[in-house]
Image (cartoon, grey):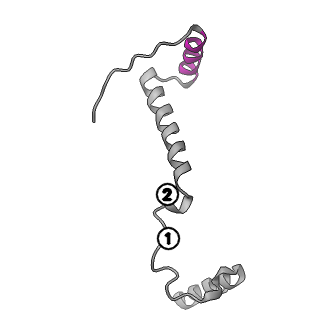
């Protein structure tokens, strides 16, 4: 991990706002900045990918032998119920 010193010039209003946030959060400047950067970075990453992509994509084997009509919710519910009954019988 590379560490470096960050020097930021803030106007008086922003400095007061920072002091208020630090007092409210009861944290140090470095920790607050790390959290803000991490939150912003996650926000940027979320915009690049869909939920499925962020979770690793669709399982390749999941629908391989599935019936064509499983896109209908009622058909999926039946298929799941049959699977669970078969598995727990």
| Secondary element at image label 1 | loop
- Which numbered tag is attached to residue 16? none
Task: Say above or below: 6 vs 74.
Answer: above
Q: Position of residue 36 (x, y in %)?
A: 50, 32
Task: Say above or below: 41 vs 36.
Answer: below
Q: Position of residue 60 (x, y in %)?
A: 45, 76
The residue at 67%/81% (across/down) is 77
Q: Which residue is mark 1?
A: 58
Task: Tell me the crowding category of disc 1: few under 14, some 14 to 19, or many 20 or more residues within 10 angstroms, Cα based.
Answer: few
Picture quarter with the N terminus: top left
The residue at 52%/88% (across/down) is 87
Q: Which residue is mark 2?
A: 54
Q: Position of residue 21 (x, y in %)?
A: 57, 21
Q: Position of residue 38 (x, y in %)?
A: 47, 37
The answer to whether residue 23 is magenta is yes
The answer to whether residue 56 is magenta is no
**Which contiguous range is marked in magenta?**
13-24
Residue 82's image quarter?
A: bottom right
């Amino acid at each position: 991990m590379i560490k470096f010193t960050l020097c930021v010039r803030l106007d008086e209003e922003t400095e007061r706002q920072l002091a208020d946030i630090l007092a409210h959060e009861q944290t140090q400047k470095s920790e607050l900045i790390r959290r803000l950067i991490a939150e912003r970075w996650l926000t940027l990453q979320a915009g690049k990918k869909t939920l499925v992509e962020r979770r690793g994509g669709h399982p390749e084997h999941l629908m391989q032998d599935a019936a064509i009509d499983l896109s209908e919710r009622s058909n999926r519910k039946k298929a799941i119920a049959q699977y669970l009954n078969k598995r727990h019988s």
